[in-house]
Amino acid sequence: MMTPEIQIRPNQIWHGGDLTQAAALFPDAPGPWVDLSTGINPRPYPLPAIPSAAWTALPTRGGLGALLAAAAMAYGAPGPDSLVAAAGSELLIQILPRLRATGDVAIVGPTYGDHARAWAAAGHAVRPVAAPGDAVGTADVVVLCSPNNPDGRTWDRDELLDWAARLAARGGWLVVDEAYADLDPARSLCPHAGAPGLVVLRSFGKFFGLGGVRLGFVLAPPALLDAARLALGSWAVSGPALAVGAAALADLDWQAATRRRLAAAADALDGVLRAGGLRVIGGTALYRLVDAGDAAALWRHLAYAGLWTRPFPEHAGCQGWLRLGLTADVGALDRLAGALASFAQP
């Protein structure tokens, strides 16, 4: 049987999570599909009862206020006025580049590809850099993810604050995407929200396992928050998302227990990956990055077994990388172990 190759056009956005794409490419794969491609918590926060008015009425100021208060508490931010909510941090990634004059933007990578695409689409000159310090003295904006997606790199908080201050002195920004910071809140910059030049993005769906809710936040100096509110419009978050987000973000006990559970699940995934002959080279408690050698071959092999993972053919020099998220249960982990064992056989 001919095996489909990974075909990605230079400007194509390659995201995980699309099992319709998986089924179309590999129609004979055994079901059910196991989605390991996203880095989203496979055991989500239990949905609360959503009032019927959340579906039928326009979102209210009171609902938004409750969400922002819960988010500020969960993130350790100074208060509800220090952040703005939107329908996903992805939307904020698209909006931010349009809230300042075009200039020189350094993206610390390899990292989440939509940052570079969004800044370039808004007319900025975008260049990749290996480390923030390589660009703080010259760029107008430096963008990084901490923890970084996909390798899990982090940076010292004091060093990040120093870089933000240095950029602010020249009218610049340090944009820190903290999509996976819920896993280790002590590293978050949210307690410093409002510091000159510091822009922090937070994602709700990954840690809480509710990507479909579409909820995210930006924490920034007051003038930038005002510009973001204006760009987002009057109802930036749906009524159901307000209700679910407020309940989940206020549930600190669930968050603490989930951090412990995810750490144990990541350790179990590490054991399966290493037993399958793979070298774990990075990641977070929600996903692992491995050096697979021939990642395209392993990606296809796993897909034929009904396991959907995330390759990186769009990043030069990363063709050996494969990212695998956590499994929802032991049965799915056993399927992964069996598929890796069969790949290792002659």
Image (cartoon, grey):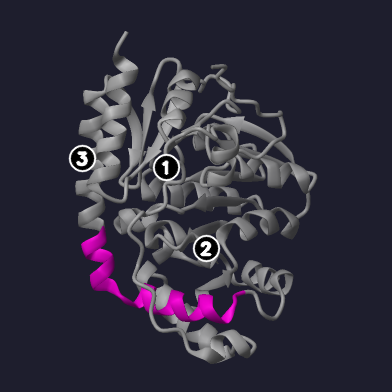
192 to the left or right of 25? left
User: Where is residue 302 shown, x and y percent of the image?
Assistant: 41, 29
Judged from the image, the secondary structure of the residue bearing numbered disc 2 is helix
Type of amino acid under label 2: Gly
Q: Quick check: can you spot residue 136?
A: no
Q: Are marks 1 and 3 in contact (CB under 8 Å)?
A: no
User: Where is residue 132 shown, x and y percent of the image?
Assistant: 51, 37
Judged from the image, the secondary structure of the residue bearing numbered disc 1 is loop
- Up-down relation of residue 236 to residue 192 (above or below): below
Q: Which residues are magenta?
A: 237-258
Real-space Cα separation, disc 1 to disc 3, in angstroms: 23 Å
Residue drawn at (46%, 63%) of the image: 204
Q: Which residue is mark 2?
A: 212
First reached walking from the N terminus: tag 1 or tag 3: 1
Q: Which residue is mark 1?
A: 31
User: Where is residue 96 shown, x and y percent of the image?
Assistant: 67, 57
Tell me the quarter of the image containing the C terminus.
top left
Q: Are marks 1 and 2 in contact (CB under 8 Å)?
A: no
First reached walking from the N terminus: tag 3 or tag 2: 2
The circle drawn on residue 83 is none
Of 346 and 222, the residue lying toward us: 346
Rate crowding at label 3 as few (under 14), some (14 to 19) or many (20 or more) other CA atoms within 10 Å.
some
Q: Which residue is mark 3?
A: 268
